[in-house]
Amino acid sequence: MRTYLVTGGAGFIGSNYIHYMFRKYGDDIRIINLDVLTYAGNPENLKDLEGNDNYIFVKADITDKEAVSKIFEEYDIDRVVHFAAESHVDRSIKDPEAFIKTNVYGTGVMLSCAKAAWELPEGPDPLGNYKPDKKFLHVSTDEVYGSLPEGEGYFYETTPYSPHSPYSASKAGSDMLVKAYMDTYHFPANITNCSNNYGPYQFPEKLIPLIINNALHGKKLPVYGDGKNVRDWLYVEDHAKAIDMVQEKGKLFETYNVGGHNEKQNIEIIKIILNTLNEMLPDGDERKAHINEGLITYVEDRKGHDRRYAIAPDKIKKEIGWEPETRFEEGIKLTIKWYFEHEDWMSNVVNGDYMKYYENMYGKKEKA
Ligand code: NAD
Ligand code: TYD
């Protein structure tokens, strides 16, 4: 049985990935989920796995080398899938240090512990020899490439890094460490750089769940700047599939860009959500009375706001055969349906701490 060490598996993408992997491989795999449970980590995301003997949760911090080493000593790990990170750009603008610690130093700890556990003392390769079939996948973002002009160009794997926010700079730093391990020690790894994800279990500090939740409650929909910044949206299950395919079919030491071929301005996303909510709510639902464009509120722009992200996923398609499968029109319906069916999840998440964050973030931002 293959054993996976997933970091950050209680977060948005990690929990979707764990569900995807158990759906795909069933009892043929065992997953150890290493997560410290920050505000973004939610054990509820995986509560349906309680009682599954092939799922093990370890509450620990990736910056705690002793705790991470202990996991590698206790279990014969075959695959590491490294999601754990501070992931929200706005928070990184307010508190960059947490991002540097977890994203850069924490990735350094993961690499060092995996290398120590997998390294063989001798072998033919002067740079490094490893136990067979061990692989580390570092999950990263397209934001490391910086910002594209409107309507022109794409991010390729060869695009030079040019991060602007403390979040993307810390992710770029973590990518560079993985590259350094591959180049210096022939450490068996891959990197994926993915575009913006959306889907079930996403924390409502990010655009799509925030807009769904606010619209349902008749709250204002905050649009940064002119609302014309472009993101390339990918349904989260397609990302989970890409990660698995890269690890099993990709060439070691390679980077793969993962993207949705789905560029949209933020204001377009908000209007699609409003229309879809109205379409999906049953006739006579009282919330329909307030779900309209009157809720849209332009607020002060994000500092250093990247204008456009757009991935060219040509390499992953050509070498591995991965393509986005879920069209946005379908993915947004699946996402809204999930939030309708999990109102408790949302109300548990939107607790006192979230309200404090929300007040601090949006309280003073509204434009006159
Ligand atoms: P998330 O914020 O929802 O989840 C992060 C998880 O990591 C949480 O469960 C949190 O508790 C855990 N974590 C944070 N610090 C930790 C630490 N020090 N030790 C152990 N666990 C820790 O993030 P997400 O949106 O699921 O993103 C997952 C990964 O994918 C990140 O590396 C992110 O950079 C990358 N990524 C995200 C997107 C996106 O659109 N969300 C797109 C591309 C890449
Ligand atoms: P976000 O979901 O934070 O992802 P990222 O910054 O990693 O791309 O934001 C997506 C886009 O939506 C980004 O251009 C910022 C914008 N945005 C708003 O206009 N209003 C909001 O309240 C939020 C959270 C984001």
Image (cartoon, rainbow, N blue to C red):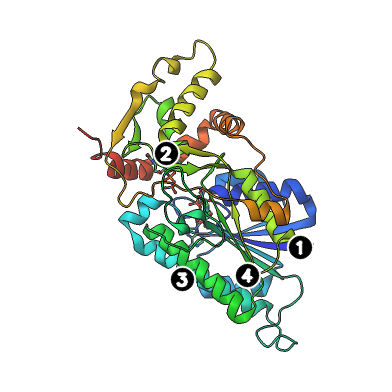
Picture layout, residue 133 above or below residue 208: below
Q: Position of residue 110 (x, y in %)?
A: 56, 70
Q: Residue at x 40, y 40 (%)?
A: 351
Instruction: State which tag comes first along the sequence, 3 or 1.
Output: 1
Q: Position of residue 17 (x, y in %)?
A: 64, 50
Q: CA distance from mark 3 to mark 2?
A: 30 Å
Quadrant of ligand 2 in image: top left
Q: Amino acid at mark 3?
A: Tyr
**In the picture provided, is 48 more to the left or to the right than 311?**
right
- The image quadrant of residue 250 is bottom right
Please state which of the two labelled residues, at mark 4 or mark 1, is closer to the viewer. Answer: 1
Instruction: State which tag comes first along the sequence, 4 or 2.
Output: 4
Picture layout, residue 159 above or below residue 111: above
* Residue under label 3: 105
Q: CA distance from mark 4 to mark 3?
A: 18 Å
Q: Residue at x 50, y 54 (%)?
A: 142
Picture layout, residue 176 above or below residue 326: below
Instruction: Please state, as top left, top right, bottom left or bottom right, where the N terminus lies in the image.
Output: bottom right
Q: Position of residue 242 (x, y in %)?
A: 66, 51
Picture layout, residue 293 above or below residue 93: above
Q: CA distance from mark 2 to mark 1?
A: 37 Å
* Residue under label 1: 2
* Residue under label 2: 350
Please state which of the two labelled residues, at mark 3 or mark 2, is closer to the viewer. Answer: 3
Numbered circle sitting on residue 71: 4
Q: Is residue 54 visible?
A: no
**In the picture provided, is 190 more to the left or to the right than 365?**
right
Q: Dots 3 and 2: beta carbons under 8 Å?
A: no
Instruction: State which tag comes first along the sequence, 4 or 3.
Output: 4
Please state which of the two labelled residues, at mark 3 or mark 1, is closer to the viewer. Answer: 3
